[in-house]
Amino acid sequence: MVKKFTENLTSLCDAFEMFKASGKTTTVAFENDRLTEIRQGESAGVSIRAVKGGKIGFSYSSKPGEVDETAAAAIRMAPYGKPYNFAFAPKQKSKHTRTYDKRCEKLNVEKLVGTCLKVKDAIKAIAPEAMAECSLSGGSSNTRIETSGGQDCAEQESSFSYAVAAKITEEGNFLSTYRFRSGNELIDEDEIVREAQEAARDFLLARKNAPVKAGKFRVLFSPDALIDILMPIGVSVNGLNIEKKTSRWVNSLGEKLFDERLTLVDDPFHEEGPSGGLYDGEGLVTQKRALIEKGVLKGFLHTLSTAKACGHEPTGNAQRGVSSVPMPGNHNIIMAAGDVALSKLMKDCEDGLYIDQMLGTFTSNFLAGQVSGNVSLGYAVKGGERIGRVKNCALNVNTFDLLKGHIVGISKEREWVGSAYLPWVLVEDVSISAR
Amino acid sequence: MKTLEPQTRVTSKSTLDQRGLKSQLTELVKRSGADYAEIRLEDSRETALSFMGKNLENVSEAHLYGGNVRVLVNGCWGFVTFNSLDELEERVKEAVRNAKLAARLMNDKSVLAPITPVEDTVRLDLIADPRQVSLEDKISLFGGYNERILGRKGITSSAIRYFDRCTRLYYANSDGTWLDRELMDMGCGISALAVKNGITARGSTTQGGRNNFGLFRNLESEVDQAAKDALEAVDAPVVKGGTYTVICDPHLAGVFVHEAFGHLSEGDNIADDPRMQQVLKLGRKFGGDYLNIYDTGLDVGLRGYLKYDDEGVPTQRTDLIKDGVLCGRLHSRETAGRMGEQPTGNARALTYRFPPIPRMRNTCIGNGPHGKLEDLIKDVKEGVYALDSAGGQTNGELFTFTAGKAYMIRNGKIAERVRDVTIGGNVFDTLRNITGVGGDYHVRDGAGGCGKAGQMPLPVSHGSPHIRIKDVVIGGK
């Protein structure tokens, strides 16, 4: 070939977008007190959306150097694709900056194994009968997006995450208490060990079982459980569900839907946030935006395509892996803190339940607001104190009702759960089924 | 039936060149310096399309290409993945370095259960090859279903996705196993969505398999039923929460056995945990004499079919519960080795990016003595008939899954439709509470898969007859 195919892309198709990504990760995992894995992974790939005859084709390859072939395949797919009725990203530059931690590029495997051993010792010192788990993973990635609209943006990201757990499996009692966090900087060993100690202390508390009967309860949701409760909001602001009119909020912008203490902001720039970035998956500059502000619906999450279809402005919320087409999604979800200390919220929970982990809620009918699932880690609260673990009970709530008129209080304290930064929320009238 | 060579659909020569590969890989694993070494190379081509509402949302061709090296030194693992095959020897060295490091820091020792090495070539044996069906035909077939759904009064939107993936896998290990395999995997999910008064409800149907594109043709009546289900569900009340006798249809019972018992049987849960070994002691009674649970890789055509697992171990039918008594588990060579048991051919890796771990294939409840649905239902005063699945999850002891559709049972008869039926329970209690196992075993695949340790979606199957379970907790209003 005299000239590279991709250099001619502009003449071969009407418009294109090329997304290149490469990354390196190192993972060290301890399970059941033993080192089970040292994994080093390298990945790379290119995906191309090409427009021909007013329609879009998509192709992806993880084979190094296979850019021309991928472009040819995308052009070949185009006649069958969906209409190109928006425009790939124009030239634009983000005014923001983002933390990059060079230390994540070359993690010291020996040191990571050492941290795992410290985690194990820390857990055993508090809960000798528990088995320890610890998974540490980090790395760096590079992405570049070029479009026929003139955009050419590249981003380098670093990442690090840990998950630690104390667990036991015995007759009539499987228990795992865990802590985890992801960030875009190396996380101090001290924090990881401290959180392992927390998980071990929870483990001791959860070893005692407490009875629970079906009924209506005051429930204090931890940030980990709250993320399940917020899922119906996430799917309802998703631009795809707005475009297809399967969200109930198609015409609800500006309406007060929730308690005024509820504010959710999508922040791609949060310095501790593991997600986000300066550009979205289509090369648009990202923005910090309110989705729910003081209970009022303020915005949706859009790709270029869903924004166009809905007649809205693009929001810079295209999320994608290198092998998939962009879909609307959030960056970091930041929920506004409340004005009550967590210790006070626990007192106000009175004789209720503290729910920390849910199981299988993703199978619920989120678009209808339903969140249902087994409580996989919950505690009975008596006189404002956790007294033991409740088991074999299920939760069923409708988020749209629950967060409208049933919030008792929201904590000042917040924690990261994946890419969400959430407080504890105390609600009342929660229906619990139990045997 | 004819054997087909994989087609190259991207313009360049991008399929791995098999000539020379065998000697190169077998040589590399032999002189790695590790106690055990294996190399996996993978070259996959996928065609996918999806409709959302009236749009053909996406149509794509993808090429997944890469490999990994896994080595064992003094009982400790090193694992390295890559896209480029240029520096294979260096990758092997890297894996060995990591394994040596682990061995220096840990006194723990993995032992692989011995196997008889195999050399084999596995070629596709297809009833109808999706690669012989043009993209136009696929679009027109699924587009036809989409129009059928959207043409139905009251339907708001639709979601259809289809994929076919043809994979060429090369595998060599230092025990002398060499495999050159072709695998086909296909699936589709078809959903109708209805929105009314702020309520969204869904009706769905699925198909999947490994050897027959014909499965996706002539689905008109299933598609019409999905639309009807969505329209019925949107008007149905949410089920009243409580404790019920539940009858599960074969599909949902299959999801139940997968979630509730299949995952528990995976050897990596058991091998390292002495307490778990007590809980899952072979010979323990888990259910009625009529309860039989097994996992098999032998069902040709199902997505859970595999001739060899990803450690080169021939698959088999593995009985897990026979006549109510625990009799087996799902092993990789490592978990079998640690427990002094036989490998069962359950070591599977989603792609080259992951190491093989114990996973399911086709997980089933075997036929029982309690007849058909009518026989199981006739003595139920008030209960729930739950069909199809919207997915599920387990933590080993507790599980949750949601029915695709459900009806109340009143006085031995199927009564009104209810929606959003989520079933939660304790695995051990629920197995004991299975009071009836029908004789109408059925299995149907979908487009989804099983997730574990970040490896998702792995193609699996699950089948069962109708079953009846007492005292099931259902979350609801």
Image: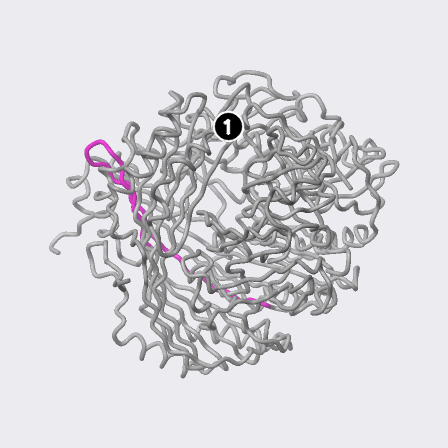
Classify A415 as above or below B311.
above
x 47%, y 81%: residue:
B116
Three-letter residue code for mark 1:
Val
Q: At which x and y percent is residue B44?
A: 34, 58
x 69%, y 30%: residue:
B240
Q: In which quarter of the image is the C terminus of chain A?
A: top right
Q: Quadrant of the N terminus of chain A?
A: bottom left
Q: Quadrant of residue A84?
A: top left
Between B398 and A194, the one lying in front of the other is B398
Give the magenta part as a residue range: A36-61
Q: Quadrant of residue B286?
A: bottom right
Answer yes or no: is residue B394 visible: yes
Tag count: 1
- Whether A390 is among the magenta residues is no
Q: Which chain carries label 1?
A: A
In the rendered image, which residue does mark 1 sit on?
A237
User: Which element type, helix, strand or loop, lies under badge 1?
Assistant: loop
Q: At which x and y percent is residue B136?
A: 24, 41
Classify A103 as above or below A355.
below
B240 with respect to B153 (left or right): right
Q: Residues within 10 Å of mark 1 (few under 14, many from 20)?
A: many
Between A260 and A323, the one lying in front of the other is A323
Q: Identify the residue at the far right of this view.
A: A383
A213 with respect to A82 (left or right): right
- Whether A37 is among the magenta residues is yes
Q: At which x and y percent is residue B289?
A: 70, 60
Classify A26 as above or below B422.
below
B330 with respect to A168 (left or right): left
